[in-house]
Image (cartoon, rainbow, N blue to C red):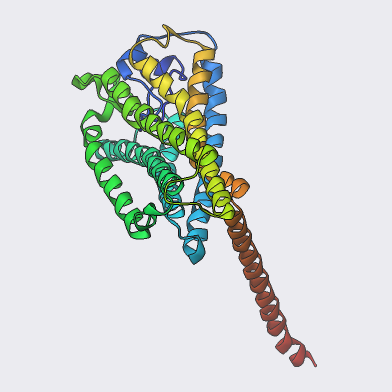
Amino acid sequence: MVASCNRTAVHSKTREASSTSVEFVRSQENQMADYDYDGDTEAIEEVLGIVVPILFGVIVVVGLLGNALVVIVVLCNRQMRSTTNILIINLAVADLLFIVFCVPFTAWDYTLSYWPFGDAWCRIVQYLVIVCACASIYTLVLMSVDRFLAVVYPVRSMSIRTQANAFRCILLTWIIIFVACVPVLVCHGVVIVDGLHSFCTFRVDAGYNIAAFYVSLCMIAFVVPLALIFALYALMLNRLWLGVPPGGRVSAESTRAKRRVTRLVIVIVLVFAVCWCPVHVVLVLKSVGLYGERMDAPRIVVQIASQVLAYTNSCVNPFLYAFLSDSFRKGFSKVFFCCRSASARIFSACDVLRASSRAPDNVNRN
């Protein structure tokens, strides 16, 4: 979640004094200056300077198209506008914003050794990336609460699980996150090293404690929400698989539908946890000085891999919907069919125009 998109320790001798960038998977500038680098650093830099931007480019394209498709499918299909799907739209929007505000700047950071966008934009980018990352995990909390109410209190929760209440919860969540993340604007900024390189990073030089920041972030934006989610699902699954929900019996089809939706949400949560756990571990270990004295090839690869894995989460959810949800699969198919039909009509119209443009010439020749 932290807004940093680290290029850590991957740069050659001229860049050794700094190795952080837009701060998602990065550590502080001063700490990195103390690392030793082995002889493979320059070779690793050359490879990562090519491979990582390509990977990020794929994530951007797939993430933008996939999440936009999710939003279109739900908005264009009135039957899919359930509380769960409204929350899925919010998750897709958070992923879209994360892709827009983090991944391109990370790719830039791997390619060049300076930040050209100014101090104000540096702070805004860091702020928005953390906001969007927090919005994703707390949207999963809302989805888990929605599933809990639907499964454990199917009758009594009908008056609570409405579209209006879903929108209210989403709005309140965003407002709280926007306010809670304001300190990010203060403790980030552009740092100039040796008068040659500038980086958008956590301002350790201004006296801010990076260990406290990353440990707090890990707890607030990962450990605590996941603990809430797992507690809700433990209670929910006990009721879903072993007992009859309070308020009377429900139909077998309704139970099966609830199980399908619950399974989808569980998979989304597990994938999120798997994707984000490594990067949080790396960030915390680096911030407290336990990541190692030497930034050798294995540590660099682990750090970059954890970052790429975290970013991949922003584009993987549409594939989960396609595999695990019949309604989304049908919605995706309908959109693709409409696109093919529209393309066919456009090509047909072009053929007609070309044919009509040739007709006068043929008449004149005759």
Q: Residue at x 49, y 25 (%)?
A: 306
Q: Residue at x 78, y 90 (%)?
A: 365
Residue 229 pos. (x, y %)? 41, 35
Q: Quadrant of the N terminus?
A: top left
> In which quarter of the view is residue 108 placed?
top left
Does residue 48 appear left or right of residue 141 in this picture? right
Does residue 107 appear left or right of residue 34 in this picture? right
Work out whether 81 lies above or below 126: below
Q: Do we see residue 240 in this rendering?
A: yes
Does residue 330 appear left or right of residue 224 in this picture? right
Work out whether 317 lies above or below 213: below
Residue 39 pos. (x, y %)? 53, 8
Q: Quadrant of the C terminus?
A: bottom right
Is 150 in front, or is 291?
150
Residue 245 pos. (x, y %)? 46, 45
> In which quarter of the view is residue 292 placed?
top left
The number of discs equals 0
Q: Do we see residue 57 in this rendering?
A: no
Work out whether 239 lies above or below 338: above
Work out whether 203 lies above or below 107: above
Does residue 111 appear left or right of residue 325 in this picture? left
Outermost residue on the front side: it is: 248
Outermost residue on the right side: it is: 366
Residue 183 pos. (x, y %)? 21, 33
Is 222 in front, or is 326?
326
Q: Residue at x 38, y 44 (%)?
A: 142
Is 114 in front, or is 143?
143
